Image: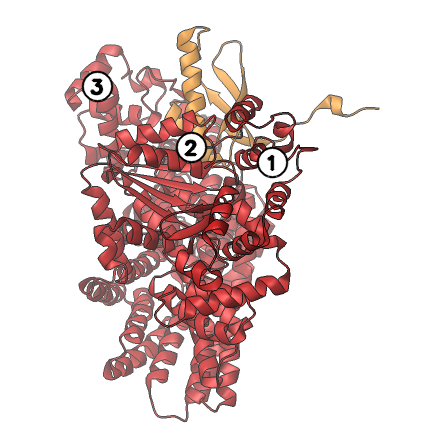
Chain colours: A red, B orange
Amino acid sequence: MIELVEREQALKSLREALQEAAMRGRVALVAGEAGIGKTSVLRAAAREHQARGPVWWGICDALETPSPLAPLFDIARESRPRFSALMSGPRPALFEAVLDELRLAATPVLVVFEDAHWADDATLDLLKFLGRRIDRTHAVLAISYRDDEVGMSHPLRRVLGDLPPAHRSLIEVPRLTPDGVKALASRLGGRADGVFEATQGNAFFATEVLRDTSTPRAAVPRTVQDVVLARFARLPASVRALLQLVAVVPGRVERWLVDELQTPSLNDLEAALASGLLLADATTLSYRHELGRVAVEASLSPPAAQDLHRRVLAALAAPGRATAAARLVHHAVAAHDREAISRYAPQAAREATARAAYREAGAQWRIALKQGQPGNDVEHMEWLDAFATIAGLNSWIEESLKALQELQSLAGVAGDVERAAAARARQSGPLVGLLRHAEASAAIHEALAMVEPLAPSVVHALLWSLESWQRMIDRDYEQSIHWGRRAIALAESLGEHTTLARAQISTGAALLFVDYPAGAAMLLGVRDRRLATGNHFGVASALSMIGSGSGELMHLREAEDYLRESVRICEAHDYNGTYAEAWLALCLMLRGQWDEAAATASTVLPKVEGTNMTRLMALLALARLRLRRGDPGADEALEEARQMAEGSGALQRMAPTACARAEAAFARGDSERVAAEVRVTLPLAQSKGHPWFVGELNYWLWRTGAIATAPAGCAEPYALEIAGRWREAAAAWQKLDCPYERARALSLGDATAQQEALAIFDGLGARPDAESLRRRLREAGVRGVARGARESTRGHPCGLTLAEIRVLEFMGQDLRNAEIAARLHRSVRTVDHHVAAILAKLGVESRQEAVRRAEREGWLAGPAQSGQSRRPK
Amino acid sequence: MPRYLIERTFPDGLSIPLNEDGRKAVASVIATNADHGVTWVHSYVTPDRKQTFCVYDGPAPEAIRKVAERNGLPIGRITEVNVLDPYFYRS
């Protein structure tokens, strides 16, 4: 046990969290470098808490590829909670049971997850699941990790970022001060001089040095390894052998395992414990600190380490020892035992898949394929097939593609045409992910040619559904529907449900573009069937598909509803719903809800690094917002978007990028750039018959004066604008619920229309448009041009925000929330939220009271005095 | 982290008294900014106190707008800027 010095603050924070947990649970993040004393603080808190309530303690081991949910297994084994019975069952039910138990606990529970920087994917999912719901429990979820090893891209960082800030606290365990080292020295009876300088206040290192009173110390050891190994070297050979055995097993070693391999004498055991390097409980041995274990392990010669791993593996794998396969793989790899790797890695991969720990499953398949040896080609193909699927789920796109290519060639050699064709066609998925659309199409066409001579079978249904999907992605609606219908009929007759649903989704999505109600009905049908079977992930992805399709077709209200529902389901079940979120940002931007659009796009971006379609769509939302607000950063976002979109060759990525870039080029008066953006993309949009893309691209050409009339195929509002019918165009945009586009149309109308446009631009915060229109109006000698909208507010005495003051003003005009929402281009939900916030901040019970107070304090100055422009009614 | 110059207009004039109230007002702005990774470096105020130019560090213009909204501060033009120090150029 590291002596507890200078840890009062950390301990106090945990103590307070545990007291508060009687009312409301909390996440405590215990962070600090290796050896700093995180475990000691947690152990001290656990000792105090034991008398009052249960302590659950789980440890993430430093296995090369960790065993899924290993810490939860620790808790199940040692604390015997009620959820133990569900450990081998499906994951959602298990997670719910853990949560329930913490929710219904009579006294606060201290739940410790130690060393979470080593956690497997399933454990990370559990931490996120519990962490996001912690306020509904009576538990303190204490998560310890080495913060210096958790970089921005570490999987734990994502989980921590998703925990609600209101219900988590960060407990940083600091280094010891020089006084702290002195206090520690006087407790341990060691000499403090030079120790702080050498150890820099690392608690484990300092304790080890100070504890070393056996010989006169010439100099303080330079590293923690030196001090551990110096102590190790002084022990008798039999004790060293014991310590070496324990060192090759990360985490805790079972006593039976030690006894079976070495039968240490009681004297040796006691000497090992007395050395301070080992700890023991009733059934296990472990190093007092991971740093000690690593130091001893690293000192082993390679043959000696290999031999120890081989013996540990043999004992753990003996019949009747139910050892987790991941643990066996760890030792098999270290022992270079190819045969054992081939046996246990696939088993570990399947166990991880069953627990939805896909990162670990993928890592195990990787080990099997690289370091193992499949028994025959059939087994090899099975491994590749499974790895390709898992790699796809992990977005390891290149690896998934490579596995499918290998699978295809193996199947080809084996003469299994159907398997080879399926592998070839499945390459379209990763290829689209890499934005290599032409190659994706080629892959499916080649596969189709391979199976053409064969009688229709399961693989035909699969290929046809993939072709339908690919045609839909490339916006060849008629062909997508054609192949989709064939796939649906065949899959139905064969009872292939997965293929059937996939074909229905792609067919329905393509149908949206030809016959919107029919497409929507088909997609909603899939949603309903998935809802009936409790397939929430499937429901969310069907909604995401119909939502993004509706958005591209400017059915914005429907789009917003479907996308919000998809995002809600993803949030409730911890799925990745970023594509729906990115599209929601685009729809909110078009509907004039710019603050929410900006917030949504800003949350998506950090979650989707690299080249992918979700990042592209979020960037486009952000770029248009920045352009329209006159904020910096639009060009950077559009440049990143261009690079992604160009490679794709896909209309649905290239066209919206070109439209946004044309808007930017027009805004800086660069007509040539507008023409260049249109030149590349317009022919593609025309060939696919996409009225919205054709319309907007032509609109920008018209604004530069390059064309005078609208070519065929433009969506109505754009055709009206190009025809100079601004009044009708504005009405059409209003019907679509696009206030910015409406104002843009009005700004090209007569003086009255321009005044109206100005009010809308001001209300939206479209500064550049408002400024240039205001200048034009003044230059034209129009009188009474309203001053800027957002120039009137100062820090409010009650802390009301700008938006709240605007809502309060409308409340003063006796408007209902729905009316206010319409005036402000906000959702009713947003206005509800503002009204509640106003009542709370003013400390009043009713709207009337709030308005009376505002009038009394003079906050509702008339529009003329405040300079606040009125919105059109 | 990018640096931004933010122009704000206060028609009634900005007033942050040099007392406990002023300290509280500034501290609350700083605390709100910190929630969004934004730092208020300093500001320049016109003599009539109706116009301010604030230098902020922040991850993106959206974060600058978010904290302005939460702090109840008006916001006009946001411009991304870099420091140019004339005394850095030595002969």
Q: Dividing the image into 4 quarters, which one contains the N terminus of chain A?
A: top left
Earlier sequence position, callout 2 versus callout 3: 2
The amino acid marked with disc number 3 is Gly
Can residue B11 be seen by looking at this rendering?
no
A99 or A590, nearer to the observer: A99
Can residue A615 be seen by looking at this rendering?
yes
In the image: residue A375, left or right of residue A235: left
Disc number placed over residue A769 in the picture, else none: none
Which chain does the residue under circle 2 lie in? A
A503 relative to A448, above or below: above
Tell me whether the residue at label 1 lies in contact with that at label 3, contact meaning CB atoms closer than 8 angstroms. Answer: no
Q: Quadrant of residue A566?
A: bottom left
- Residue at horizontal 38 percent and vertical 71 percent from the top: A469
- Residue underneath mark 1: A214
Measure how far apart labels 2 and 3 are at the Cα level: 34 Å
Earlier sequence position, callout 2 versus callout 1: 2
Mark 2 residue element: strand
Which chain does the residue under circle 1 lie in? A
- Residue underneath mark 2: A171
Residue A431's spot in the image, x, y percent?
50, 69
Which chain does the residue under circle 3 lie in? A
Residue A319's spot in the image, x, y percent?
37, 72
A498 or A727, nearer to the observer: A498
Earlier sequence position, callout 1 versus callout 3: 1
**Mark 2 or 1, closer to the camera:** 1
Disc number placed over residue A843 in the picture, else none: 3
Measure how far apart labels 2 and 1 are at the Cα level: 36 Å
